[in-house]
Amino acid sequence: MHTAAVSAPAAGKIRNMKKMSVLLGVWLGGLTLLNAGPVPVSDAGTNRVGIYDSRAVAYAWFWSAPQQAALKEKMDAARAAQKSGDKVRFQEFDQVLRTTQDQMHREVFSTAPAVEALAQLRDKQAEIARAAGVRELVSKWDASTLRKYAAQEQVDVTDQLVSAFLKPTAQQAKIIAELRKSTPVPPEKCEELIRQGKM
């Protein structure tokens, strides 16, 4: 587990991405309890394993058309509850918003598994793996699983997974590139920033 504090440049990146994080935070979808481990997709005799940056994949999932449509529908429902004065219903939405915002911060800025995204790609994973010539898909942040594949060639399949969700705009492509170049916020620091309301 990482314990280092966030550097000044990393803190700046967090501030610069605040607008994006606010939008991430309004996603009202329920959190899933899916297995977030490696995804075996092929039994082909290959010594190649597909790795991906889960931050970029989670970001692409959030901005995909189906997720944005669902977001709009649920945001409209939340606004309607507020406008009608239904405080109980609105508070329920608010709690879901807070919980989901925190989870999206963990996935996009730190190294939490992109479980919702992988669940949406369940039917496409085998095809992506075959095209890349790999037998399994593993997050590049999943050190314990990657140790099992230390002798195998690692093939980055992040772009393929991102492309399964959306064709990034120029701005989205820039953010994804910045995410992939940056060092993730260590999990403990991410939790601290969430508790302090700074993320």
Image (tube, rainbow, N blue to C red):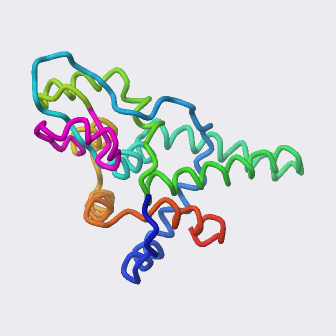
- In the image, 91 versus 193, the foreground residue is 193
Image quadrant occupied by the C terminus:
bottom right
> In the image, what residue occupies the spot 36% across and 29% down?
121
Q: x, y percentage for residue 111? A: 42, 53
Which percent across, then down, holds residue 172? 33, 57
Q: Quadrant of the N terminus?
A: bottom left
Asked if residue 144 is among those painted magenta in the image, a careful observer would answer yes
Which residue is located at x 29 percent, y 47 percent?
140
Which of the pair 50/104 is nearer the observer? 50
- Name above or below for residue 158 compared with residue 49: below
How many marks do you count on the picture?
0
Q: In the picture provided, is 176 more to the left or to the right than 7?
A: left
Against 127, residue 157 (above or below) is below
The spot of residue 131 in percent (x, y) is 13, 27
Residue 94 counted in the magenta span? no
Horizontal and vertical percent for residue 10? 39, 75
Q: Nearer the viewer, residue 140 or 17?
A: 140
Position of 88 with respect to 56 (left or right) is right
Q: Place residue 165 in its image quadrant.
A: top left
Which residue is found at the position 60% from the left and 39% from the top?
29
In this rendering, the answer to whether 130 lies above or below 82 is above
Residue 143 versus residue 43 in the image, above or below: below
Q: Residue at x 47, y 63 (%)?
A: 20
Q: Nearer the viewer, residue 101 or 70?
A: 101
Say left or right for 192 vs 158. Answer: right
What segment is highlighted magenta in the picture? 137-158
User: For the view shown, which residue lies furthest in the top direction?
Assistant: 43
